[in-house]
Image: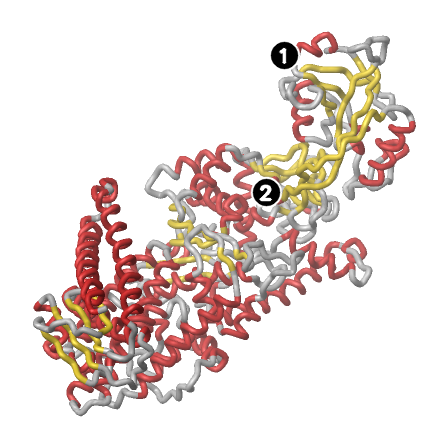
Amino acid sequence: MAKEVEMSTKYDPTAVEHGRYQEWLDKDLFKPSGDTTKKPYSVVIPPPNVTGKLHLGHAWDTTLQDMIVRQKRMQGFDTLWLPGMDHAGIATQAKVEARLAESGVSRYDLGREKFVDKVWEWKDEYADIIKQQWAKLGLSLDYSRERFTFDDGLSKAVRKVFVALYKKGLIYRGEYIINWDPKARTALSDIEVIHQDDQGAFYHVKYPFVDDTTFNGKNYIEIATTRPETMLGDVAIAVNPKDERYKQLVGKEVILPLHGRHLEIIADQYVDPEFGTGMVKITPAHDPNDFEVGNRHDLERINTMNEDATLNDKAGKYAGMDRFEARKAIVKDLKDQGYLLSKEPIVHSVGHSERTGVQVESRLSTQWFVKMQPLAEAALKNQETDDRVNFVPERFENTFSQWMENVHDWVISRQLWWGHQIPAWYHKETGEIYVGEQEPSDPENWEQDQDVLDTWFSSALWPFSTMGWPNEDAADFKRYFPTDTLVTGYDIIFFWVSRMIFQSKEFTGRRPFKNVLIHGLIRDAEGKKMSKSLGNGIDPMDVIEKYGADALRWFLATGSTPGQDIRFSYKKMDSAWNFINKIWNASRFAIMNFDEKTKAELPDQSEWQLADKWILSRLNSTIREVTRLFEDFEFGEAGRALYNFIWNDLCDWYIEMAKEDFYGKDRSLKHNTQNILCYVLDQTLRLLHPIMPFVTEEIWLAMPHDGTSLVTAAYPQEHAEFENKEAEKGMDNLIELIKAVRNIRADAHAPLSSPIDIQIKTTMPETQSIFESNQDYIERFCHPESLQISADIKAPTLAMTAVISGAEVYIPLAGLIDLNQEVERLQKEIDKLENEVSRGEKKLSNQGFVNNAPSQVVDEEKEKLTGYKEKLSATQSRLAEVKKEM
């Protein structure tokens, strides 16, 4: 039975949500059931970075996960939703360094050990904040299994994977051109580089011939560059071997301006004859394409830049200058010494560090790499099997496949102090490399690699490392892996989703998850991406404080379709709050009219009235639709189905009709209606609970029920015996009649208090039967002074008219209406009906629709067309009659 809960007259989210989450935790409602007879269902949370507070994107992502998990738990699955956080190497280190810089301290001032202690302090601070935010959102996480990417178990998994890939030849160490962040002083992978348009210039520079060679009457060639600060690392000039213009120049030498080094003109297929002059300078230590050219031609690699993007000793007089200062100085010297031919302003795409925002340098460096081709091929091949990962929407599988097909080797070493230190040691005397899960037996003779692993290396193992792997006998790994559904944004398909798939296939032989649900980004009301720089970011905790978590969750759940972006607006939040307030008020009214005998149980079907049959049939359809749409991850459509049922069917009609029984003298009828309403409300709250956990729990606990919480209550199921199309059609007729009378009253400015006569001329026997057996409802909702229902009624002379399915409605309103206005109204109705008939005929004449649409849908369209034609004919006849009276 219900516990005594006093429901306030207005929905107050703060009061409703206060303390509820802790109650759920205290009762251990979020933990797996432990019942091995139940089918397991598992989700691992995409671990948020401990870089700061969660934003609206996190709120969206986790709300969708919580909805899935809550529904599955209610459906009887043994659910595990595993929480955790990511150490987020470069991102977190950058945050901590920025905080220290405010006090004039750098990480080098502290040293590695003390700096890492500071990062741990940051981690603890923000992990607490994140967990508070999870609680505010109502996330049903099993905190007893919470993980962090630096946990001992996860760190062990990282070392095992590194060593295994190294022994297999899939991890190697080599000197390559990599993306370099000069502010963080670390390597970056390709997908950690954000390209954006910057102002720049093409500098056209003379490279004189060494001898007396001339070309096109000139003793030099012209080379264009956007980065003159790297030209001191030039080692050659390249042309395409098929370019007839320059064949005679191949093998000749030119002088490097400002330096004097001789550069040979070489032929290489890399050069595009159509781009620029068709001649390019080759700087192998500062450009990835030049690096490859240099390898093919055995060219020297001259690195002229330090880790912090200042020029080094190989840059001569410019050594010690910042790269952009050096650019200005070099350009000035080129101009002063007669080498600068022209400067052409341009806007070009330049790589920037995703984390620090500075321009990235292509820099020659010794790094650790993962050889990607074999891993990518295995992951792609797995997509052709039953063990494939299902992408929702499907189009994102192409995004995954295209990246995997064109993937480059992955640079995994980072020159940071916060991260998993690479498990490689170098012998102090011999230089021998040892790679192992444990340090060498004589550690005093070895020095561990100072670099750490890319954050994504550890998070790629997240679905199985969190379950106890590499111990394949771990209980959670055996029961809950592979996981069922991953929810994430389309912006990290490359970063994370792809890597989880190939690492899981390599080390467990299986996919990491059955489904990956991809959502979009949250944008502001104008469609702009939310960002600090634009000042349009929204703190989800501020939204919850004003509207409550349930309103935010409702907006996030129903505001978009899979894969699409969502626009946040306070107007939408107002609508979400209003919807919950409607539910609150309707529920409060219902509960106030229950008594000690009320139960969420249905009386015998023989005692169901038309409205009862109708609401139970509509409830059944809603259960079927919402369950199906949840299964397809179509939460927006599920929300619309719930909204229409709750607002229109339950609140606006059934509860209003129930008042007739509540206030009537028939006690048996009142008791039946109480129980039916209690049952429908109970089932509705269960349907809503995964989306709105707080308010549904509060209302449900105030009702008669079995169980302790909606969290573990049974999810609604379809009941074939509730399906009643005849009752739905009958109720539709009744609603159509009531709406028609209300519209006439409105058009005639006749309020409900105005006495009116209602004459209903029925054209179908079943319609007459429905109206006669539900006359009480007609009188309650239409307030007639007199009511006639008959097939023999003759249309009055002065009357307002409505044509509905199976009947015509006449309301004599002599003196209240103008016949000209009535003609105008009827003509508008005819225009509307003609449009509907035209639309229906066009649709049904389309053979593509008729042949491909489900037969039920085609039949429904035919039935609607017939109805519109009947209404059109009746309305045209009525218009003709009115005109006769004028």
Q: Is residue 183 above or below residue 227?
A: below
Residue occupying image coordinates x 44% and y 83%:
10
Q: Secondary structure at mark 2?
A: helix
Task: Please state which of residues 478 and 487 is positioned toward the viewer in this rendering.
Answer: 487
Residue occupying image coordinates x 44% and y 44%:
396
Q: Is residue 372 left or right of residue 362?
A: left
Quarter of the image with the N terminus in it: bottom left
Q: Is residue 632 above or below residue 824?
A: above
Asked whether residue 97 appears in the rendered view, the answer is yes
Q: Earlier in the sequence, mark 1 or mark 2?
A: 2
Could you say where residue 460 lies in the image, as x and y percent from the top left?
Answer: 52, 48
Could you say where residue 750 lies in the image, as x and y percent from the top left?
Answer: 31, 80
- Neighbours of disc 1 within 10 Å: few (<14), some (14-19), many (20+): few
Q: Secondary structure at mark 1?
A: loop
Q: Is residue 397 left or right of residue 363?
A: left
Task: Please state which of residues 685 and 446 is positioned toward the viewer in this rendering.
Answer: 685
Q: Is residue 639 left or right of residue 729?
A: right
Q: Is residue 82 left or right of residue 622?
A: right
Task: Please state which of residues 66 and 374 is positioned toward the viewer in this rendering.
Answer: 66
- Neighbours of disc 2 within 10 Å: few (<14), some (14-19), many (20+): some
- Identify the residue position indicated by label 2 in the image: 191
Asked whether residue 28 appears in the rendered view, the answer is no
- Identify the residue position indicated by label 1 in the image: 242
> Disc 2 residue type?
Ile
